[in-house]
Image (cartoon, helix red, strand yellow):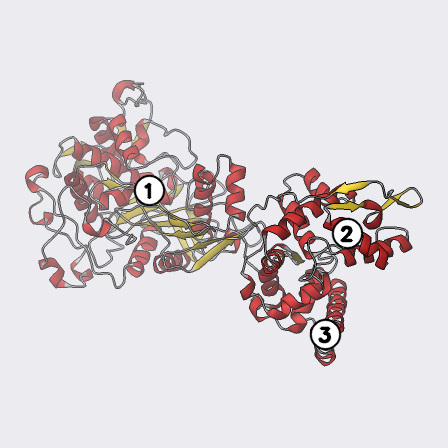
Amino acid sequence: MSSIVRLAGAAAAAGVLTAAFVLPAVGGSGVVVVAATEAVNLQPEELAEPPLAEKTTVYDAEGTRIAQFYAQDRKVVPLERIADVMKTAIVAIEDDRFYEHGAIDIEGTARALVKNLTSGGIGQGGSSITQQYVKQVLLNSAETEKEKNAALEASYARKLKELRHAMAIEQKYTKDEILEKYLNIAYFGAGANGVEAAARRFFGVPASRLNVAQAAALAGAVQDPNRTSPDRGAKARELLLQRRDVVLDRMAELGRITRAQADAAKARKLGYKGVKQPNGCQESRYPYFCEYVRHELLSDPAFGKTRRQREAAFSQGGLKVHTTLDPKAQKAAEAAVRKHVHASDRALAAEALVQPGTGAIKAMAASRPFGGSARRNEISYNAVADTDHGGLIGFQPGSTFKTFTLITALKQGMKIDDGITAGAGYTAPGYAAFKNCAGENVGDPSWTVTNDEGSPGFKTLATGTWGSVNTFFMALQERVGLCPTVETATSLGIKRADGAKLREFETFTLGINESDPVTVATAYAAIAARGTYCPPMAITKITGRDGRTATYRPRCERVLDPQVADATAHILSGVFTKGTMSGVGGIGRPAAGKTGTTDGYASAWFAGFTPDLAGAVSIGDPRGSQRHKLTGVTIGGRYYGAVQGASLPGPIWKDTMTSALRGVAPARFTPVDTARFGGCGQDCAPARQHPDDATDDAADDSTDDSTDGAVQEPYEDPFGQ
């Protein structure tokens, strides 16, 4: 064999390799050696090295990991963060002359040739670590099955291509750099790519803390990782144990460890732990918020022109995604929902919390677990969001939409004590009584609206709202106009959860358009922010694997006159003391809100806010709210003849806000401009919900420092950037 080595070495040095001396050709029934006159010109060929697929990690507002996504479980680490014994083991078993030869290990290749010639086939490859790295790059770069097969095919064309690339790699990098790249790209089995992921998956330790036995097991795994993948059962683990011992013997044979060290390591059990690495929202602590973030990224063209490109960037790009989720608020929402609605209930409750003046989503919770198991009553969609963020059709928000008619009336100059006489029933006086925004007549004089709550008679803007009187709001919407009411709602971000066009019918004010808690909470947050609407945001910054960071700031605009928003907040604050929530009570600080109960009790809502936080709660039966109404139902272990906004959503909201805002100094609404909106006398002073709820009498004597016409100071730079 020595003559073969010398001849091959001389040829390789000249950049020309004689095929007969290195590459056995297999054909027919035996071995055919390529003629010595067939010279193969081996010149370095540049190798494209796309970034390795790495996991994307999502963090909450405090920097704690809440989810991760990966197509390949991998964490790239520098060579200094890999145990020396791991480097020693992989070199010993895969390429013991790695630090001595160039791109081609002539001795190893010739040794493989002799083995192949005597066995009648290709039984030994003789590939160097550099060649193996090249093969892994080509395999990882393959996008189609055809390209993957080409990267794995047993052909001389593929082998020669690898050799050319290997020569270029040896010229481009040091040996340590090549070893680092190889250890980060290699597949070890059990879904672990790269030595760091393998060390954690197999043994629950980082690669820097691997011991001799563990390092030998991982080094042995790369030869045939599918066959020795320890997650495949006892037989595979036994094969891996045998491979480990082969590596230990080889290390001892080469003098890299002593025979005593090898024997001691061989006496140890494999020690496979199978540490599970969470992947996707289903395994996140906060799956609904996670789903919202995932859909945000997959719909943003900044991460790729096509969805396929964006999915690749998300699952392979190694992004660090920082979000708005507040663990305290999330815990409060989850606890409140679980307290009132059981996961086993048919009814499904969902809640979203949004920060006024930023649109930052602070929490998203639902009463059922997220997943795909019907047996465990899991749901596989985002119950808190719209279809653009993984949700479904949502539920009709009912009387929470009356707020938009109220705002429209205030915009048009009506005062708090202005009113309308409401009857026991309302019938449109004609088809032209309501016109949609296309100018079409949509009145229906053949249908009569009745009252589920409140009594007929003269109602002011305040008393009609507190009593949530249907007939009053139908008459009010007739007066202010259907289209202006729709325009008010859309200016506050209102849209259908299913993405369809809003249904502009005369009953718009009664909440006939299915919606989701995030959308409704964000609309109410704009009232709290004195008319400044900020679209919901979940992401504050994203850092790429290259260290560059993109920062996301609130995109807000003034959509309401601040004084109109103040008057709206004042009227809605009375819902707790004089209206539909009076039986539930307030939260010990200034707050405002509106209950929502749909026709026939198909669903129920509550949407409300303080100057610091807004929230919306919905409940309905996902099997079909119109077919499975909330009447005669047991929810949370309690029987309800009929579920209204104040029955369940209101208490959930109250418990959530009380807990989420604990420790936060109470903020006050800006007083109503009585000269503009009229006579509510002493009631126009900054309101508390109930004397019994007062937590700090001194707060009533403090002066308001908000600035008319501008976003209040706490909202200017929420993330301190």
Residue type at mark 2? Ala
**Residue sitting at 20 percent across and 37 percent down?**
560
Q: Which residue is mark 1?
A: 520
Q: Which residue is mark 3?
A: 255
Q: Nearer the viewer, mark 3 or mark 1?
A: 3
Q: Is residue 383 visible?
A: no
State the residue in front, 48 or 37.
Answer: 37
Q: Nearer the viewer, mark 2 or mark 1?
A: 2
Q: Position of residue 253 (x, y in %)?
A: 76, 73
Residue type at mark 3? Gly
**Residue sitting at 43 percent across and 35 percent down?**
498
What is the secondary structure assignment of the residue under circle 1? Answer: helix
Q: Residue furthest bottom?
A: 260
What is the secondary structure assignment of the residue under circle 2? Answer: helix
Count the labels in the image.
3
State the residue in front, 576 or 303.
Answer: 303
Residue type at mark 1? Val
